[in-house]
Image: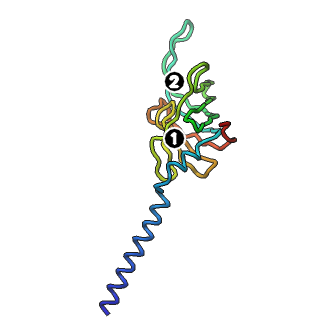
């Protein structure tokens, strides 16, 4: 009877280890980085809410200062296979309207670089720092603004087309 119990326990432990390994491989696949990097290629449209402090320099009729603002943000981005990207961002809210794009006109192309990948999260170095892209599927991801950015928030992206490269 004792021999059967030991055999049963050994089989149960081996099965548990096997199931744990399979779950680990699906949660944090070692092949994740190239697949996620390829998934990022193409055109994306994003939207979200961003909060931060806005500093206004004094001008002739404006006192200047700092104000906390919250804006609705929309982004059009394209990530190319050669490591270049474009980024057009618009903000509306709290009586503020701002636009910026990367790269600036007549500037050299902006570059993106994969810093790391784990599971469905791809960490990418872009103009605002190291951003984490969490993929829901091949056509959707959320981006948490990097700690180095002067704002906080999350932007949700949906694929809007394919890369022209």
Q: Where is residue 155 drawn, in percent x and y?
A: 58, 40
Q: How many labels does the image show?
A: 2
Q: Where is residue 95 drawn, in percent x and y?
A: 62, 24
Q: Is residue 107 above or below residue 139?
A: above
Q: Residue furthest right?
A: 161
Q: Where is residue 26 drawn, in percent x and y?
A: 50, 61
Q: In this view, does 90 lie above or below 32?
A: above
Identify the secondary structure beneath mark 2.
Answer: strand
Which residue appears at 56% of the width and 23% of the height? 108
The residue tagged 1 is 144
**Label 2 or label 1, whichever comes before in sequence order:** 2
Q: Where is residue 16 drawn, in percent x and y?
A: 41, 73
Identify the secondary structure beneath mark 1.
Answer: strand
Q: Left or right of 68: which side holds 80?
A: right
- The answer to which quarter of the image holds residue 4 is bottom left
Which image quarter holds the N terminus?
Answer: bottom left
Compute the Cα span from label 2 to label 1.
19 Å
- Residue situated in front as seen by the camera: 146 or 162: 162
Q: Residues within 10 Å of mark 2 (few under 14, many from 20)?
A: some
Which residue appears at 45% of the width and 70% of the height? 19
- Residue situated in front as seen by the camera: 156 or 34: 34
Which residue appears at 55% of the width and 28% of the height? 110
Which image quarter holds the C terminus?
Answer: top right
Q: Residues within 10 Å of mark 1 (few under 14, many from 20)?
A: some
- Residue situated in front as seen by the camera: 86 or 31: 31
The residue tagged 2 is 54
Q: Residue furthest left?
A: 2
Q: Which residue lies furthest to the bottom in this view?
A: 1
Q: Is residue 13 above or below residue 7?
A: above
């Amino acid at each position: 009877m004792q021999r059967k119990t030991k055999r049963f326990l050994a089989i149960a432990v081996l099965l548990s280890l096997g199931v744990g390994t399979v779950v680990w491989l699906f949660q944090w696949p070692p092949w994740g980085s190239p697949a996620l990097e390829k998934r990022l290629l193409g055109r994306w449209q994003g939207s979200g809410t961003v909060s931060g402090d806005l500093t206004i320099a004094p001008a002739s009729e404006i006192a200047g200062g700092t104000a906390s603002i919250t804006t609705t943000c929309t982004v059009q981005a394209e990530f190319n296979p050669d490591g270049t990207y474009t980024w057009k961002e618009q903000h509306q809210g709290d009586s503020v309207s701002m636009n910026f794009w990367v790269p600036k006109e007549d500037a050299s192309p902006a570059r993106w670089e994969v810093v790391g990948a784990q599971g469905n999260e791809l960490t990418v170095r872009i103009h605002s720092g190291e951003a984490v892209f969490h993929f829901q599927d091949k056509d959707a991801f959320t981006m948490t603004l990097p700690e180095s950015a002067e704002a906080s928030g999350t932007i949700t992206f949906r694929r809007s087309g394919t890369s022209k490269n």
